Amino acid sequence: MRSIYFLKLISISFSISLVFSISIYGQAQDISRTIIPVDWDVCKYHPVINSKSSSIKPPANVFQKMARGGENCSTFIVDYNGFTPEAQAAFQFAVDIWSNSIESPIPIRVSANFSELDEGVLGGAGPTNFSTISVDGLPPNIAFPLALAEKLVGEELPDSGEETSTDIQATFSSTANFYFGLDGNTPSNQVDFVSVVLHELGHGLGIIGFGGVDDDDAPTQGVLRIQGFIGVWDNFIENGIPTAITSFEDPSAELLLEITGNNLFSNGPITTAQNGGIKPSTYAPAIYRRGSSYSHWDEGTYPPGHPNSLMTPSIGLGEAIHNPGLVTLGFMEDMGWSICGGTLSVPSFNLTTIEVSPNPFNSTINILTEANSADTFNISITDINGRQILKLTQKISNGKLTISNLDQLEDALYFIKIQNENTGARVIKKIIKN
């Protein structure tokens, strides 16, 4: 018998608004930063019977790159406080997995702390703040976690008077029975520290929504927006009909039914593609669990031992998960992160054999394949809210297919899915209309 522990997010509270003018894509743009108040619980655990132990290793290409000391795709700068050498090595191992999975030209700054916490508290992490960004293709009412906001604009966004800002705040229990090994062979009476850090950093990087309830003990309404803003996670959540979570009155009893209806999914196109074409289910139990509900993948869909189980709300004794999983990496790309080459799988053909140009585009898109290709392709374009804008089936002629009359589209970020009708192979790319 082993216990499963429910992971929750660290409590953070902040509120201030700033406006900057910085350079994006070579043009000066106004960046509206809104640091909004948020209240999340730290990680807590509740014992649950589970007889299955499991160990999921890092992605092979990531592990090989780490082993040979290759250059990371992103740089994490960690300020360690109260760490033993073995704890720091385990934390750094989790950091290295993320830094070889996502790309960013801007350092991701993490404050990592060990502290004596309440009984039953493992620890937690979250973004230090969120920022709105007025960039072509990004809706103005969406708040991005600081690390992602900085990646999207290509510059650090420090607080007023500061040269840099911490992007992610992490605190862990100094009394919890953690296993600090790097091998994934976690004893059945310990919690794997690498897995907990990998999970919590995922929240700090953006796997987190604003959805909640008005009263934990006796909720009557669901709530979503903070100071009028939604988080980037919220932008991709819908029910099974499908109706976007953002379509419901906020706050409202109807929104409460959605948040506690066990019927919410992520409609991100890349996320869905990495889940075999099925929109991944999120954790929305009938009894709302602050810090666990809404901001995780569903535990029943991705149980212990599943390759996409890292960002579910629970982890068990003896369970090691050293892999973000393709579904999580797909969502990271949907919300704006770039993925290290080779991390995501694309069947039959890959990004090097399909080219979409020009990008950004105005009224016409050209899809280029091998010069002798004459296959038929199903093509669809969706916006950042998951709405399908265009769908067509067309045959490639001499390795080229042209889609015209797109000038009526709003200037925005879109996803184009190109699927070979004969082989079923597909690829999804981001395109920008301006």
Image (cartoon, helix red, strand yellow):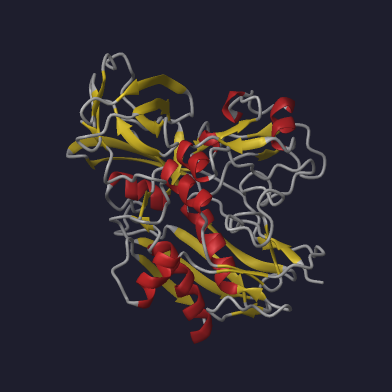
The answer to which of 206 and 49 lies nearer the viewer is 49
Q: Position of residue 406 (x, y in %)?
A: 29, 17
Q: How many marks?
A: 0
Image x and y of residue 272, in percent: 52, 39
Where is residue 42, by image quadrant?
bottom right
Left or right of 117 in this view: 227: left
Where residue 308 appears, as percent x and y from the top left, is: 58, 55
Q: Is residue 295 at all visible to an observer of this figure? A: yes
Q: Name the residue: 28% across, 35% down.
A: 30
Front residue of 96/81: it is: 96
Quadrant in the picture for residue 44: bottom right
Camera-side residue of 387 and 92? 387
Looking at the image, residue 321 lies above or below residue 269: below
| Position of residue 366 in the picture relative to residue 69 (left or right) | left
* Residue beneath the point at 38% across and 72% down: 64
Residue 129 in sight: no
For the C terminus, give its image quadrant: top left
Of residues 227 and 311, which is closer to you in this image?
311
Residue at x-position 66% and y-position 73%: 191
Q: Quarter holding the N terminus? A: bottom right
Pick out the residue farthest to the left.
26
Residue 169 position within the rendered picture, expressed as x and y whole percent measured from the top left:
50, 62
Q: Is residue 410 above or below residue 107?
A: above
Identify the residue at horizontal 61%, vertical 37% (top origin): 265
Q: Up-down: is 352 above or below 12?
A: above
